[in-house]
Amino acid sequence: MRIKESWIVALFLFITTLAAVSAVPSLNILEDTVSVSVAPNKDKIVSFNVQNTGTTPITLDFDISQLDLTDSRGEKITLSFSPSAPTLSLNASKKIDVTVSPDAKISFERFGGTLTVKDSTTNSTAKDTVKFTIDIDLDICDFGQVGTALKIDVDEPDNSDEFKPGDVIPIEVEVSNEGQNEIRTQVEAFLFNDNRNIADTSSATKRIDEDEDETFDLRLRVPLESEDFDEDDELTLFIKAFDDEFEELNCVQAKQKVDIQLEDDDIIIDESESRLFPSVAACGDIVSASIRVMNIGDDDNDDVTVSVTNKELRINEKSERFDLESFNSAEENSAIRQFQLKLPADAKPKKYDLSVKVNFDGGSDSLRLPLEVSSCRIQLQFRGATDAVTIKPVEDNFVSQQGKVISLPVVVTNNQFNKGVFAISVANIEDFADASTKTITLNPLSKTTVFLDLVVRESALSGKYSATIFVKEGAKVLASSNVQVQISPKEDSKPSSTNFPLISDIPTSIWIVINVFLLAIVILCIKVVITALKR
């Protein structure tokens, strides 16, 4: 019996050892790489498959320690796996869904690395790895990136190009059509800081035949305002090419980093916010110049002056010295200086360029503002005009009735080389009418017709009256002219289609005869009625 029991124990140990040796855990990730493109503050799901290739059931665990999921500012990407800890039986496979969730302000760049999937069973060393890539991009395509016909290649700008505030970014994009039909193609470019669009531009539409390509050239200006970005921000240029008729069928996009570098001392004139008013003037006029300058440098500057000059017009104006803080200060980094420029009375009518310059500690910047002198007052002597404004009634005599309204048309001419605001009124009408004042604006050397309403009073006596029309500029009377108004009695309302005289027009003697005749007829009728009744 002891020999038999020993054999049984030995056999049990042999079988146990054999089972332990044959129970080998193993797993395999079926994909070589896993890639996903996702927008900030959005979730996207990407999947891969794991197979149990061993001889024993396994439970999966996901190791993300070798993945780069955080940008330089601490913004993160969160990964969640579903199912989170699946068990795979022998030869079984499982689809794993990974939800990728970036923070709202994460940088537009590529993240990822090596994702390790391993068996969490005690003492198991079974594992496999997969390359996991996460691109943080915006969906600037309205329907997401769709279609395979369009391909986009960005030639400019280059990764090594550097820009500063106010610079123009040259964009050169080659778009090819690998589809089977002609595509009306348009390109749009967007400059983003974090997930905020700070500048954009678009191209004209071009028709691209199948198997052909077209080059699109665009220009996009980097904003000047420090509230849009600072030197430490990472700006990203997003470019999309799409079917202008059916974007939902074809749209592709690309991106490029934009490097912003500030010089130590750099002050510029903001061309878009610097102007002359008016830009067309006459000799002797005063022109206002408004000049905006901005510090786009990295250092404060306390030696800034702005000047406006033109030798021909004898203009030489310069501001007092002032300070500008650095670009990144976002408060005192810009200033506006205004000048009142008196044009000479003998200036020649032509176009001039006014030289605007900002000088600062470290350099200068300049700009030319065009000014047109269109005419000069000295020419008035050749025009034969002696009055600044003249008026001429269209008619000298008017006819009206009591209680009626008449319109007096008057031609007003501005003989000046300045725009004027004039008040036109009627005076000397207190005895028969009322009128209001009309105000007009006339450009230099122009005229217009003004209609003055004159309301004749019900109480006005019949007769001829004289009225005076005045033109004033402020309180000053510039011109006047007289007209005559004939007033007649108000017509009474009478029947318009009768030839019979009115009762009031019949003489009294005839009226008595008529009454006697009518009375006789009445008496005769009464006697006839009485006689008929007696019968």
Image: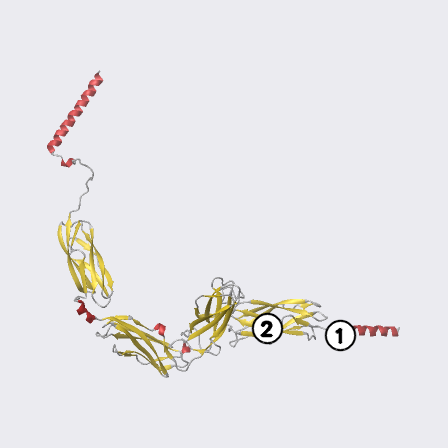
Q: Which residue is mark 2?
A: 132
Q: Position of residue 130 (x, y in %)?
A: 62, 73
Residue at point 14%, 51% (across, down): 486
Q: Amino acid at mark 2?
A: Phe
Residue carrying label 1: 21
How does the figure colour the protein chain or chains? secondary structure
Q: Amino acid at mark 1?
A: Val
- Locate residue 17: give its quadrant: bottom right
Q: Position of residue 135 (x, y in %)?
A: 54, 72
Q: Nearer the viewer, residue 195 or 157?
A: 157
Q: Please tell me which residue is depicted at 36% across the width and 72% down the height of the picture.
A: 272
Which mark is first along the chain, 1 or 2?
A: 1
Q: Quadrant of the N terminus?
A: bottom right
Label 2 neighbourhood size at 10 Å, few (<14), some (14-19), many (20+)? Answer: many
Please report the residue visible at 19 percent of the width from the left and 37 percent of the height from the top.
Answer: 498
The Cα atoms of the two marked residues, 2 and 1, are separated by 34 Å
**Residue 167 found in image quarter:** bottom left
**Residue 483, how many percent across, how many down?**
15, 56
Considering the numbered disc 2 on the image, is that residue within a helix, a strand or a loop?
A: strand
Q: State whether residue 22 appears in this view.
A: yes
Task: Tell me if 521 is positioned left or right of 206 in this view.
Answer: left
The crowd level at tag 1 (other Cα within 10 Å; few <14, some 14-19, many 20+) is few
Q: In the current view of this chain or complex, which residue is farthest to the left?
A: 509
Depth check, mark 2 against mark 1: the one in front is: 2
